[in-house]
């Protein structure tokens, strides 16, 4: 007998197949899901690898951070939290590498 926990109920091989069948019946509810990337979602063009920021922002200029992140992200999170407390624990902070432009900064 195969067992797994689901909502504090043990499932056997027999009723597990019922669960799978039920899930398949509802799969048509997800036919309209459209996957996109962060650039399309934000309405910005894909970055040019030759000119995009080499930092953690991946050419967007903002980096998602949470309190448990390491420096410099922790300090940036604390600054953002002081300005406006978060509801979900996350802040999007300005990338320190490109200063929020998303572009590679030329030396000199």
Image (spheres, grey):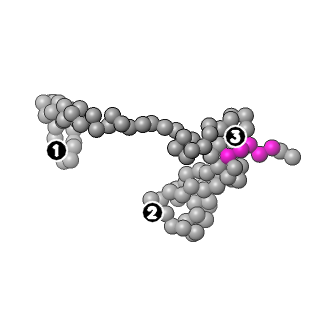
Q: Residue at x 12, y 30 (%)?
A: 14
Write down the region rendered in magenta. Answer: 102-106
103 left or right of 24 in image? right
Q: Earlier in the sequence, mark 1 or mark 3?
A: 1
Q: Position of residue 2 (x, y in %)?
A: 18, 31
Q: Residue at x 19, y 31 (%)?
A: 21
Q: Position of residue 79 (x, y in %)?
A: 61, 65
Residue that mark 1 sits on: 9
Residue 4 makes an appearance in the image:
yes
The prevailing secondary structure element of the residues shown in magenta is: loop
| Mark 2 or mark 1, whichever is nearer to me | 2
Q: Position of residue 62 (x, y in %)?
A: 61, 51
- The reply to whether callout 2 and callout 3 are in contact (CB within 8 Å) is no
Against 79, is 36 above or below? above
State the CA–CA distance, disc 2 to disc 3.
Answer: 31 Å
Is residue 33 or residue 65 the one in the foreground? 33
Residue 12 makes an appearance in the image:
no
77 left or right of 32 in image? right
State the CA–CA distance, disc 2 to disc 1.
Answer: 33 Å
Q: Earlier in the sequence, mark 2 or mark 1?
A: 1
Residue that mark 3 sits on: 52
């Amino acid at each position: 007998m195969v067992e797994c926990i689901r909502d504090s109920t043990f499932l056997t091989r027999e009723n597990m197949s019922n669960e799978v069948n039920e899930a398949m019946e509802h799969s048509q509810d997800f036919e309209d899901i459209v996957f996109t990337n962060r650039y399309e979602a934000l309405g910005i063009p894909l970055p040019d690898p030759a000119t995009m920021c080499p930092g953690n922002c991946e050419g967007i200029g903002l980096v998602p951070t949470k309190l448990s992140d390491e420096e410099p992200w922790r300090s940036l999170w604390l600054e953002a939290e002081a300005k406006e407390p978060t509801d979900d624990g996350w802040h999007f902070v300005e990338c320190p590498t490109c200063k929020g432009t998303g572009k590679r900064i030329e030396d000199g």
